[in-house]
């Protein structure tokens, strides 16, 4: 099943649901994540895609969890076109299972900090909001963020099921949903929705058992007349390129560039996707010459 996101509405309810198994596996492969990091990063990327689905084209958002736990920061960028990238500061963290016998994402993320969401809407300055962490398990923290920072009552569900494909660790089911009652939702609608949420299975197990995003929505909205709206393909995709990295090197100081040229080579790694870009001495010299020409032009 390809990764995808579906938008739907029902009587006084808006819901987005996503299947993200493949893109979580791509993140695991690129960053070499151990189980705790894989679950935390997978949930964060899925949450970012769900929040970004409400943006306009060419907008984007970044979610960062900084709970001062052993994982360090967990960050994901997402766009409404369905693209996401992300990283975790310390992807090799190993922790024992939590009291429920599950991967201890909360212990990895920590709770002494905040979740921050920055929306890039094309205005001069991005819009940033934040909320204190609840449990570091990602879904409850995003629910709290939406209520505290955006005054939007919501229910967020996220799941990443980690297992093994042969000898390698892999994600065998990942996905998520956001449900939001609209202003015209009646008390009866909210009561019925809350009853459904109490009995629904975990998202990751729904995906593992073959449900697509429409199937997840159908489980969440049993007893509702659901109007399915749009479907968007999802993928892990980074915007980095050798040209963009060259622009970063161009901004270095004269002494730093000269030092790289003296070394005879440079390798730059994108922390979002772990792609590595090598620069020869000749390429570094060309960047140096371009930087000097720009500075001479600015001074004249």
Image (cartoon, rainbow, N blue to C red):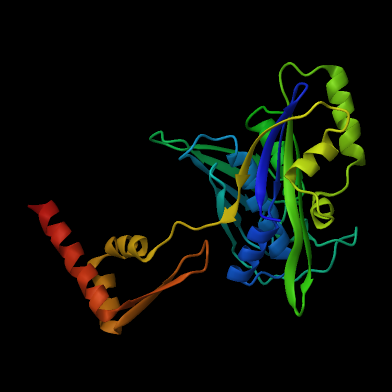
Q: Quadrant of residue 107?
A: bottom right
In the rendered view, would you say 93 is above or below 142?
A: below
Residue 136: tell me if it is visible.
Answer: no
The spot of residue 205 in percent (x, y) is 84, 54
Of 288 and 170, which appears nearest the observer?
A: 170
The spot of residue 109 in percent (x, y) is 70, 57
The spot of residue 222 in percent (x, y) is 87, 33
Of 284 and 227, which appears nearest the observer?
A: 227
Q: Quadrant of residue 134?
A: top right
Residue at coordinates 26% horizontally, 74% vertically from top-left?
Answer: 284
Side of 291 where 117 appears, left or right: right
Q: Residue furthest left?
A: 300
Residue at coordinates 76% horizontally, 21% vertically from top-left?
Answer: 12
Residue 257: tell me if it is visible.
Answer: yes
In the rendered view, would you say 190 is above or below 6?
A: above
The spot of residue 6 in percent (x, y) is 68, 40
Residue at coordinates 16% horizontally, 58% vertically from top-left?
Answer: 295
Residue at coordinates 26% horizontally, 82% vertically from top-left?
Answer: 262
Please state, as top left, top right, bottom left or bottom right, where the N terminus lies in the image: bottom right
Side of 258 where 160 appears, left or right: right
């Amino acid at each position: 099943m390809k990764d995808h996101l579906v938008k739907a509405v029902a009587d006084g309810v808006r819901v987005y649901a996503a299947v993200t198994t493949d893109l979580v596996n791509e993140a695991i492969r690129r960053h070499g994540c151990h189980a705790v990091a894989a679950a935390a990063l997978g949930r964060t990327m899925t949450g970012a895609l769900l929040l970004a689905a409400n943006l306009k084209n060419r907008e984007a958002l970044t979610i960062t969890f900084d709970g001062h736990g052993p994982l360090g920061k967990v960050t994901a960028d997402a766009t409404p076109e369905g693209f996401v990238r992300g990283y975790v500061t310390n992807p090799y963290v190993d922790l024992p299972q939590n009291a429920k016998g599950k991967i201890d994402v909360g212990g990895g993320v920590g709770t002494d900090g905040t979740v921050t969401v920055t929306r890039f809407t094309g205005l001069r300055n991005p819009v940033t909001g934040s909320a204190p962490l609840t449990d570091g398990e990602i879904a409850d923290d995003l629910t709290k963020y939406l209520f505290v920072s955006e005054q939007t009552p919501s229910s967020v569900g996220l799941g990443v099921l980690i297992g093994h494909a042969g000898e390698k660790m892999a994600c065998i089911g990942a996905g998520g949903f956001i449900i939001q009652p609209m202003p015209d939702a009646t008390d009866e609608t909210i009561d019925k929705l809350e009853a459904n949420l109490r009995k629904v299975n975990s998202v990751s197990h729904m995906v593992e058992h073959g449900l697509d995003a429409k199937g997840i929505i159908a489980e969440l909205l049993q007893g509702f007349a659901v109007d399915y709206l749009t479907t968007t393909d999802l993928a892990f995709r980074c915007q980095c390129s050798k040209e963009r990295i060259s622009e970063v090197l161009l901004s270095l100081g004269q002494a730093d560039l000269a030092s790289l040229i003296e070394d005879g080579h440079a390798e730059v790694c994108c922390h979002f996707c772990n792609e590595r870009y090598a620069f020869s001495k000749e390429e570094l010299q060309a960047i140096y010459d371009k930087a000097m020409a720009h500075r001479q032009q600015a001074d004249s």
